[in-house]
Amino acid sequence: MDKTFHITTFGCQMNEHDSEIMAGMLLERGYRQEKERKDANIEIINTCSVRENADKRFFGTLGQLKRRHEKDPDFVVCVCGCMMQQQRIIDQLKAKYPWVDLIFGTHNISRMPDLLENVLSRRDQEIEIWDGGREIVEGLPARRLFRSKAFVNITFGCNNFCTYCIVPYTRGRERSRAPEEILKEICGLAADGVKEVTLLGQNVNSYRGTYEDPATKDRAADRSADYDYCSFSHLIRLIAEIDGIERIRFMTSHPKDLSDELIRTFANTPKLCHNIHLPVQSGSDRILKRMNRHYDREKYLGLVEKLRRAVPDMTISTDIIVGFPGETEEDFEDTLDIVRRVRYDSAFTFLYSIRKGTPAAEYEDQIPEEVKHERFNRLVELVDQISAEKNAAYEGTVRQVLVEGRSKRSRGSLSGRTDGFKLVNFPADPKNLPEEVRGDARTVQEMEDRLTGHFVNVKITKGKTFSLEGQIVSAN
Ligand code: SAH
Ligand code: SF4
Ligand code: F3S
């Protein structure tokens, strides 16, 4: 049988990158990746548990796949990702979806190709979920989504146990990858033409990597205090020394672990982009405490001030939850107030929703849906207004953009990101471009091939709420 696969990915960059790794491993074994689900005979669904109605949507998707499975018994369905780390989901899959061929968790992606081979030879349901322990499997290939930029895991799991969040239960305890392994991977990416790396982890600034002892080949346990270890800032400085890597980003930072050392690293490391995602979650001290976030509004605002003092053009984005249990109108006003004070470039806004198994799910003072929605709408209006004002201030300036490829919004345009992570769309019809930029390209496709992965200077003509528009003025 012709082995073709398609991956549907939900959730965060961690999941996006796991999908890249699964694709890399399968391509190495001679499978082909399809862009459309209908063209593939193996469908892989990489799930997320964070979003509202995640279960409902997941089982809805399975319902659609079931019809195809009934018609075509050779069609293979694999499910993986964070939802598979929840026992009740596994129980439900076993009881009601026995036709699902392969179920595996977030800790054992490296085993996926072997498990799939078992399925293809035997066609029994395979289930493999580990609690993972502290093991990190190194050296997995990845099929990158972009030519010029790549995601690199530096930590796995989370120890913070925010009271609303399921991630510590689905991804396990925090583990840091060894610095040598991270540097080796990034050197390989640089050799492959990658210019921008995004370091990934649920809380990257608590990264604490241990070096291998050259004599014994031992590695100290991640957190031993008396061992020479690599801090997050130090790791960034090491990465900045790699030739070919021009931009370094990271996601996500927890305000409680944002050190002065890291703020100095922003100021002293030109390759570290001037952008930070710093989830605030709420502007109310009372709610922050109940969320178990370990900072208050004063500490958060102090961090923002320090960041802006060190790097005046820093762009800042955030995550905010509306309607956490017990949130009063006054608490919510504090959230609006902190948004007005910080003036975020962008914000992901979430309606609080119950995750079974987390402490906040048990709180009695849940907020009625209509109150949550009403607050949510007010918040989004404010956030969008500020984003639009911030983006309008870019009009008339020239920005350096790393071209990522064809624009998703407008045909005939390319898109890329500024150092501050603003998405910029710009027309790429060679007829209208300076000769120095167009070279001998005659079509938009040829322009795309020519510029993807390269820096161009774009004059911003319009700042919209979620993106900028511009015209290329020169290439670097
Ligand atoms: N590790 C990252 C976030 C991971 S989850 C961090 O700490 O910043 C991404 C976002 O989903 C969170 O920042 C939070 O805003 C939101 N989120 C998580 N659980 C939620 C829940 N139960 N209800 C609503 N939003 C939630
Ligand atoms: Fe969840 Fe909090 Fe960990 Fe982020 S820091 S993953 S919100 S528990
Ligand atoms: Fe979702 Fe798992 Fe990421 S729950 S947000 S995919 S860590």
Image (cartoon, rainbow, N blue to C red):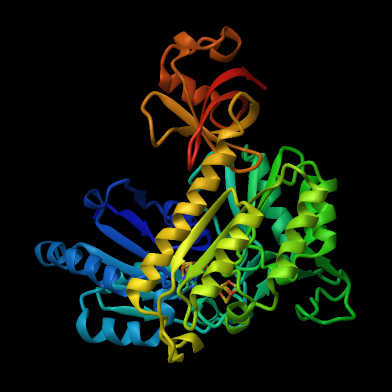
Q: Give the image location of residue 208, x and y in percent.
A: 76, 70
Residue 169 x/y as whole percent: 51, 82
Can residue 222 be seen here? yes
Q: Quadrant for ligand 2?
A: bottom right
Please provide percent x and percent y for residue 140: 56, 60
The structure residue drawn at horizontal position 53% and vertical position 13%, both measured from the top left corner, is 438
Residue at the limit of the structure toward the left, as seen here: 71
Residue 261 or 190: which is nearer the viewer? 261
- Quarter of the figure with residue 295: bottom right
Q: Residue at point 71% right, 66% down?
A: 300
Q: Quadrant of residue 122?
A: bottom left
- Quarter of the image with the C terminus in it: top right
Q: Does residue 18 appear to the left or right of 302 in the view shown?
A: left
Is 1 drawn above or below residue 222 in the view shown?
A: above
Q: Tell me if residue 120 can be seen.
A: no
Horizontal side of residue 423 vs 224, given as left or right: left
- The residue sitting at 88% across, 77% down in the picture is 227
The percent coordinates of residue 68 (x first, y second) are 14, 62
Judging depth in this view, the residue of 144 and 360 nearest the camera is 360
Total count of labels: 0
Q: Which quarter of the rendering shows the N terminus?
A: bottom left
* Residue 124 image-quadrant placement: bottom left
Query: Which residue sits furthest front?
Result: 330
Q: Residue at x 36, y 67 (%)?
A: 373
Along the line of sight, the residue nearer the viewer: 376 or 423: 376
